[in-house]
Amino acid sequence: MNTTIETLEDNLRQAMLTSDVAVLAELIADDLVWTMPTGQVVNKQFDLDAHRSGVFRFTRSEISDRQIHDYSNCVVVTLKAELAGTY
């Protein structure tokens, strides 16, 4: 299980770096929401549109302290990420 999750996480990281909207659309949950550093709350569609249009451009994504927590019917991944790019 952990190997599969690690692969998916690595695929997500690579898709973010290359703005691969097709892969992002597959990997990001439809009900995802998060708060931007500006305080703006955004969703999956915002993220996909931002990658598609070039509003988001990641140039670096360094992942550390990744932990995978398996709770039988769901998996929670926690990690630290250092990101660089433009918005």
Image: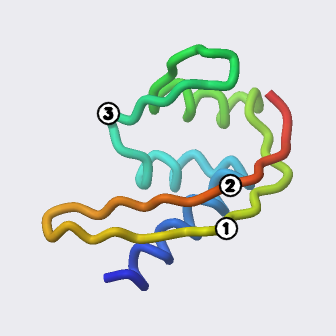
Q: Secondary structure at mark 2?
A: strand
Q: Which mark is residue 81?
A: 2
Please tell me which residue lies in front, 46 or 63.
63
User: Which residue is rendered at x = 75% and y = 57% of the image?
Assistant: 61
Please tell me which residue lies in front, 22 or 73.
73
- 65 left or right of 43? right
- Colouring mode (rainbow / by chain / secondary structure / one colour): rainbow
Q: Quadrant of the C terminus?
A: top right
Relative to 46, is 65 above or below? Answer: below
Look at the numbered discs 2 and 1 and tell me whether their residues touch, using CB distance below 8 Å: yes
Kind of residue at badge 2: Ala
Reading the chain from its start, which is encountered first: label 3 or label 1? 3
Q: Secondary structure at mark 3?
A: loop
User: Which residue is rendered at x = 47% and y = 70% of the image?
Assistant: 67
Please tell me which residue lies in front, 80 or 53.
80
Q: Which mark is residue 48?
A: none
Q: What x and y, as percent, mark residue 72?
A: 15, 70
- 44 left or right of 13? left
Q: Which residue is mark 3?
A: 31
Kind of residue at badge 3: Asp
For label 2, count other residues whose C-alpha is less than 10 Å away and answer few (under 14), some (14-19) or many (20+): some
User: Which residue is rendered at x = 48% and y = 59% of the image?
Assistant: 78
Look at the numbered discs 3 and 1 and tell me whether their residues touch, using CB distance below 8 Å: no
Name the outermost residue toward the left. 73
Relative to 2, is 74 above or below? Answer: above
Q: Which residue is mark 1?
A: 64
For label 3, count other residues whose C-alpha is less than 10 Å away and answer few (under 14), some (14-19) or many (20+): few
